[in-house]
Amino acid sequence: MTADVYRVGPSYPVPRGTLHKEIRQRVMHVFRARSGLQLEDHGVVVLQGGKTPHLYNSDNEPLFRQEAFFQHLFGVNDREDCVGALDVRTGRATLFVPRLPPEYAVWMGHILSPAELQARYAVEEVRYVDELAEALEELAPPCLHVLDGGVNTDSGLPMPPVSFQGIEKFKLEKDSLFPVLCECRVFKSDQEIAVMRYACQVASRAHVAVMQAVKPGMWEFQAESLYLHSLYAGGGCRLPHYTPIFASGPNAAILHYGHAGAPNDRQLRDGDLLLVDAGADYYRYSADITTTFPVNGRFTEQQRLVYDAVLAASRGVIAAMKPGVRWPDMQLLAERFILSALREGGLLRGDLADMLDARVGALFMPHGLGHLLGLDTHDVGGYLPGHPERPEAAGLNRLRTARVLEEGMVITVEPGCYFSRALLEPALSDPVLSSFLVDTKLLPFLDFGGVRIEDDVLVTATGAESLCDVPRTVEEVEAVMAGAPWPPVAA
């Protein structure tokens, strides 16, 4: 195995060198085509990697996770306080690392030499950060292209400014790089897809392990611990990429349950559904999967009504996905499936088109249908110049992208149906919305919780492919919870 391969034990080997060289080549191609700059104004991209993290003002250092743009371009997933430079004119990549004191080896292990680091990350050159200004002066670029101020459309937070000793000697160009790098991250190479496929396999197995082990009387956090054990012991994924949601009973109506104020701490009860939204992190790439299943292994009639509605939405959307499809149209398609099933079940009344116009769907699915997935769980590129803007209608305004689907995108498909008192109780008094709600049928569902089904889906040349492998139908879920193997053994 070559030095530039990333691998955790026997898990998937990531060929860092070829993966990130391919990414850098694509970035240069897109930059030259879309930056809007004249050729003579092309300079050197400078990215600052993640800083050594500290828990507030203590010397406690949480586990380091690399800044995503830096990881994408240079493949340095495990080293803090670095800077990377990519000369757009030549394609030459240089990594700048801290010059560490000898005592570092006592506490943290062997200090890799520049030659060892160059072999590990497959860049053209490795130098020290204290040489950065000198090295850039040698290149004599017309400017440095930086990410300063680029705003993440999910968090609303800007990229921090690049800072290093001697930066005042250079002209900084701040407009072109952020949209170019975001656009490049939207589309995954075959090598990136292979890493994400592995992360999805590991996460899928962990979901099945929980499904097979859960029972009434357990606590949500005990189910979470089983999941985390499966990720790491079974797949080398040290982290789940985001805070896992293990929401039972009414907690399943809380979209981001599991946070510090609601830490997966309810005891599972006979008759509950358990909604598990949990992913995996491998080489910084994310899996993001949601399963929902009955704690006692058998769906009730009420639970099956809601579950089948969401499953129909999931399968209908994935079947309809292909290049050229507008993502907001998929949100409306999912709502059609869910509202139709609720109307058939007697919880709603009226014309389906009128419901969609009145945005009744947002009462039951108040989040967007899905989000781009990659190095970040909510990956960048959802709203960029030249692409559709965020819709304004209720529910649709929660979409993390309104883009037209293209081959190579990886996007989550996560329809849900929730019975949230915070939404439904006011709606029952609303003169428009209440006309669609059958209160006598709906009120018994107010402590139901909710159902979400989430797949990580690759847009292909002709359609779409789910990267996940978990039980989905009622029959599959009940069989696995009763002890059947997954994947099923062929007859």
Image (spheres, rainbow, N blue to C red):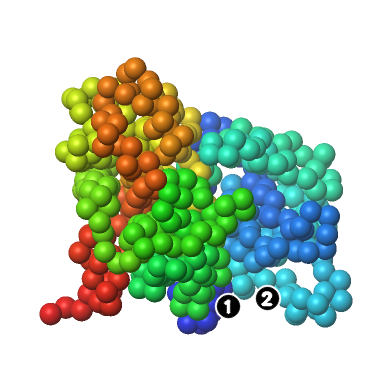
Q: Residue at the spot x=46%, y=69% of the render? A: 218
Residue 24 at least partly seen: no
Q: Residue furthest left?
A: 491
Specify few, some or many for label 2: CA neighbours under 10 Å numbering under 14, 14-19, or 20 or more.
Answer: some
User: For this view, does 396 lie left or right of residue 69?
Assistant: left
Helix, strand or loop status at disc 1: loop
The answer for how far apart the CA atoms under marks 1 and 2 are is 8 Å
Helix, strand or loop status at disc 2: helix
* Residue in front for this viewpoint, 6 or 130: 6
User: In the picture shown, does residue 264 fall above or below 39?
Assistant: below
Q: Earlier in the sequence, mark 1 or mark 2?
A: 1
Residue 150 at least partly seen: yes
Q: Decide: marks 1, 2 in contact (CB < 8 A)?
A: yes
Q: Residue furthest top?
A: 431
Name which residue type carries label 1.
Ala
For disc 1, the marked residue is: 3
Q: Quadrant of residue 298?
A: bottom left
Q: Residue at the spot x=50%, y=47% of the render? A: 256
